[in-house]
Amino acid sequence: MNTIALVGNPNSGKTTLFNALTGSNQRVGNWPGVTVEKKEGKIKFKGQIYTIIDLPGTYSLGSFSEDEIVARDFILKDKPDVVINVVDATNIERNLYLTTQLLEMGVKVVVALNMIDEAKAKKIEIDINTLSQKLGAPVVPTIASKKKGIEELVSKAIELMHKDVDFKAHISYGENIEREIENIKKVLKDVKLDYPTDWVAVKALEKDQYILKELEKTHNSDISSLLKNLEEKEEDYVLEVIDKRYEFINRVTNEAVKLPKDNIETISDKIDKFVTHKFLGLPIFALIMFVVFQLTFAIGQDFLGGYVGTAIEILGSAIETLLGSLNAPDWVISFFIEGIIGGIGTVLEFVPLIVVLYMLMGILEDSGYMARAAYIMDNIMRALGLQGKTFISMIIGFGCNVPGVMSTRTLDNKKDRMIAILINPFMSCGARIPIYLVFISAFFPEHGGLVLFSLYFLGIFIALLMAKIFSKTLFKGESSYFIMELPPYRFPTAENVLRNMWDNVSEFLVRAGTTIFIVVAVLWILAMLPVGVEPYSQNSILGRIGTIIAPIFAPAGYGTWQAAVGLFSGIAAKEAVVAILGMVYAGVEEGTALVTAIQSAFTPLSAVSFMVMTLLYTPCAATLGVIKKETGSIRWTLFSALYSFTIAWLVSVLVYQVGSAIGLG
Amino acid sequence: MLTTSLAKLHSGEICKIQKINAGMNATKRLYEMGLNTGSRVKVVKNDIGPVIVSLYGNKIAVGRGLAEKIIVAD
């Protein structure tokens, strides 16, 4: 009871409204990026607590994309007590399409007419009372970014929640369709369905694949013949239903909305002249990405990273002194200092870097630039059998592959989505940066930027190459279409950017405290056993495992048990690689000792080959987990793990062998 | 009244969508984005890559291949 669902188009300001409604009182059910799963928050109104669920932004409640199914299943199956529908006032006609679908479902709807200030600036006049009356739903004007109208919205929503009204849209579908609806309803009368019958009838006429499948599952002979009838009918009803919805909307807007005669050229239009320009678009995009990564390293690594490192060192020696004064046994001290502080500490040093990266990504997303990036990349992606939107999931993957994979949910097409999921791990995520940095400071301190840039570029190149191969072999199917809204540029709100950053960083911290902690602890134990062995030596269990795997990597130039152990642990979490290398090479976590050890264990060429391997090989456990979840298939998950390992090995061996042959070794 | 495809129009031209000859999914998506038959759009940009159209000032990028299947009249 007492649940309010938030529904709206992408770019309608839904997330901003959610933040304005719930403040700090929210938690993420999952990774956002682009709101990919349900977010939940609580609000208090007149002493009562209400739960607000933020559903994914969608244009429609059909069954094209995962997002749409998540949103509509929540509305129909979890039955929220009231739905707040966020409508972008500057784009009212299109936004009301979703409203119409909500009204068809018979749920209680309050319309939050958002960005009403921008609409006024654009000289769009909206008569709130008429709009509300025509829609048959309360309408509250809001400006989410300035927290205006929020209280009234909540009060209207709660008032409606407790009112006993029959919410039903009066959309006239025309004689033909309505006759069909009645026919279908007759057949469905005695069938138990999870959804309202009226709605199922309309969806069946719309040939909603998901609903048709649900109906098939009933194995009812009447339904089977009904489905067969529908199948044989002309497809025209599908579009006619949509047209009728627009007719309904037109009747509403004709009376309630006055649009300006001429469109004024806005600042957005001016910016777009450059940003989407035939020749300038791509260089501008490249420049923006370059600046993002430069800033990430300049602020996150060089400026802030050191402080965290120092803080961890101080903490480490404090704990050592404390344990020493308590007369703790040596192995306990070793566990805490080398295992925990050494392992987790190495990972924490990179938190500032990830903080900065996510903030910059958030700014790009919130400002509306991401959509332009997709537009610019569409041409290149199309040549590879993909479409521009795929590139957004790839950019998000630079932060972390988990949200990268999840953001493929916005792709409508199964083929696009599978390819986008399978290539995402080649995007070098934040957790891999520490590995590169150690090798760079060991061998290429003067050319760090170039090495990093080359690695990122190689990752993109391999991803695109694999995409091309996949679209020619595994996923032939229909080619995808590109339709994308280019929302007006907006100044990113600090709250949205910070919240988005925190959602991601906290996830990273949780992983550091759980997965990586466990990995580090287990590896520490393996390094200490059997009893009496010299810790971290080749005779320890860890050393023996490494020794068995090592020969595989000999052709790539780093067939040592230490390197093998490092890579092995990286499958649990990429952050663990540096921590483990530190343990096995230097016996301590300290940066300079590790760098020196690496200098003697690798050559510049094998260092490059090792970096290539870590860039491309098997995704981490968290990414594999999300691949399993998104593809719903263990086979594809295994495929992802194995094919990326194979590719990584091949490229790494190629680098080393060619390099040796031309005398770089 | 001359009909042509959206992909053939130049920047600045205004047209009315007559018919969409694309597959059902793409057509449905176009409809849902407000590009249904009868709607008037202005071509904002059409050189390389997707065509950008404006629908009451709101910009939508439509892939070139799809734009070719959108029949419009001026």
Image: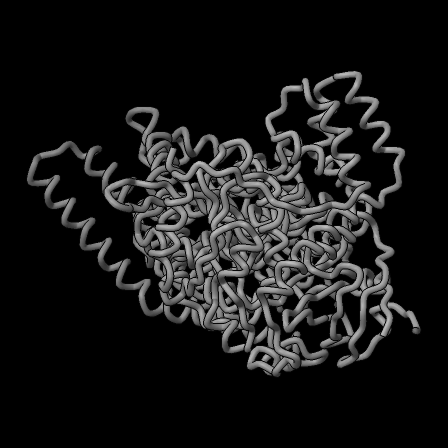
In the image, A540 versus A623, the foreground residue is A623
Q: Quadrant of the N terminus of chain A?
A: top left
Its colouring scheme is: one colour
The furthest residue to the left: A325
| Residue A338 screen position, x and y as percent | 27, 42
Instruction: Examine the rendering and report whether any part of residue A584 can be seen.
Output: no
For residue A214, above or below residue A601: above
Left or right placement of residue A630 versus residue A540 in this view = right
Instruction: Examine the rendering and report whether any part of residue A255 can be seen.
Output: yes
Residue at 47% over, 31% down: A545
In the image, A378 versus A226, the foreground residue is A226
Residue at 61% over, 73% down: A259
Q: Examine the image and state in which quarter residue A334 appears.
A: top left
User: Number of labelled discs?
Assistant: 0
Q: Examine the image and state in which quarter residue A27 appears.
A: top left
Left or right placement of residue A533 versus residue A478 in this view = left
Q: Quadrant of the C terminus of chain A?
A: bottom right
| Residue A71 screen position, x and y as percent | 55, 42
For residue A16, above or below residue B11: above
In the image, A105 versus A341, the foreground residue is A105
